[in-house]
Image: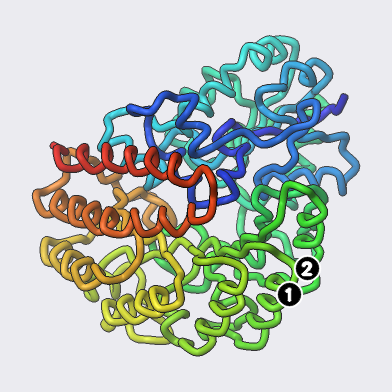
Amino acid sequence: MAEVLLTADRTLMSNYHNNEFLGFGTCAPPNFIPEWFYSYLFFPPLKADKGVPSAAPYGLRKTEAQLLKEGFDVAVISPDRLEEYIKEAEVLGIHTMDPFGLGPASSTLAAIFKKEPYLAKYFNALITDPAIRKEKKRGLKIIVGGPGAWQFRYRQRFVERHAIDCVVDGETENVIGKILRVALEGGVLPKFYEVGAGESPALEEIPDIIRPSVNGLVEIGRGCCRGCEFCNVTLRPLRWYPLEKIKREISLNLKSENVEGCCLHAEDVMLYGSRNTTPDDEKLLRLHEFVARNCEGISWSHCSLAAVASKPKLFSRLSELILSKQAWWGAEIGIETGSAELAKKIMPAKAHPFKAENWPEVVQDGMGLMHDNMMVPACTLIVGLPEEREEDILKTMELVDDLKGVRSFIVPLFFVPLGRLKNEDWFKQAEMTDLHKQLLFQCTEHDFHWVDDLLEISFRGKWYGRFLREFYKGFAGIAKRKVRHIE
């Protein structure tokens, strides 16, 4: 039995039917679909061998690799099998993504449905697991980290009530070993440890994962050079992984019988290997040629509209490589606003190498290229930015109308104070104006125009396609009616 156990809640320990974007279903609250069936539709459990999952979230795998590198006795365990392993453990590490549903997507859906989202429900179920509470009484240390660690700053009573010993926020490679040693030696841990910029690991300090990640996700770089005011990632230094490091992790994933594809993860995949905001043709092509040769499916986590629009021929060539394996592909895209004035204030570099005052045209050009190349972007808009004016909302509505012929999903998200805007006030549903509600409904209409098309493409040729497609459409229909009646 390992002295250090690592785990995550049920919504994170899933491969989402080999479609990373179905994971957004965990942001929704309980609804008309029975929970057992909803979880099957959106976050079925990973296969496990005696409690050891066949894959795990990438961030958890990085922590596992770092601790093994430093000589710790560590194991990753499924959350529903902790009781069998936790009696011998001294430390429990929990990876989080959105533990309280405070992230933009989940907080928006929670406001619409007026219920706690699934991801918050399942995190709470994990932290209150009787097996954990029992072992806590004998001295088990609980350390929490991951992309959702920032939320515990707003839930300090929760930290105290559930006796969480330490919350680590940031890139942990250079600090997690020190924290674990203090925990194992019975020392006093800080309740909150925010990793400083000077503690961010250099490329050579970031270990390769040693066991498979969910859906073959591999990181190709960290940080972002665009400097948007509302984003945490821009506060970290930009580093691109060498191609050989990426190849090693992809090859490691493909050795698992449960991983066939690859999801390339970075804040802007189109900028892989670049020194500025202009894509590097050679490095991107070499990366994608390798992935296309070796993987059965390919997706991106994120990319920017400006990078796509700046290199249309390169984007088309990358698309050809990806579409040789599948009918469509996707990525998360940040539109954020249709107002050039607001773009200049809060994200002036998001349009580079174009000018911020041309942001709406950049969006239309980039989205048009995505449509032509069968990329389906999941786009975000930010509602309630600190300096937002009525005319800014109207400009965003005009842009959404201009995009009605583009195959895409556009989701308005309530402003959450992160990055350089972390001291600003949250935007709440009670502050929504009639224009905000019109924008919300406009986006819902846009998404429903395209959802049937995408479901048809996704399930084509699969025996269970017609059956599942109707349930996904049913859930979307309920969401649409909720938006119609939002107060």
The mark that comes first in sequence, 1 or 2, is: 2
Q: Is residue 186 above or below residue 57?
A: above
Residue type highlighted by circle 2: Lys
Residue 305 occupies which quadrant of the picture? bottom left
In the picture, the disc for residue 290 is 1
Q: Is residue 190 visible?
A: no
The local secondary structure at tag 2 comes to helix
- Whether label 1 touches label 2, CB < 8 Å: yes
Query: What residue did someone put label 2 on?
Result: 247
Residue 266 location (% of width, % of height): 58, 65
The crowd level at tag 2 (other Cα within 10 Å; few <14, some 14-19, many 20+) is: some
> Closer to us: mark 1 or mark 2?
1
Q: Report the side of 288 relative to 413 (left or right).
A: right
- Front in this rendered view, residue 429 or 289: 289
Residue type highlighted by circle 1: Phe
Q: Quadrant of the N terminus?
A: top right
Q: Residue at x 61, y 25 (%)?
A: 164
Q: Residue at x 20, y 60 (%)?
A: 388
Residue 139 occupies which quadrant of the picture? top right
Q: Is residue 191 visible?
A: yes
Q: Report the side of 446 relative to 32 (left or right).
A: left
- Distance from the alpha carbon under mark 1 to that under mark 2: 8 Å
Residue 226 location (% of width, % of height): 46, 73
Q: Residue at x 79, y 43 (%)?
A: 177
Residue 378 location (% of width, % of height): 40, 59
Q: Residue at x 77, y 60 (%)?
A: 249
The local secondary structure at tag 1 comes to helix
Q: Is residue 20 above or below residue 45?
A: below
Residue 42 location (% of width, % of height): 49, 39
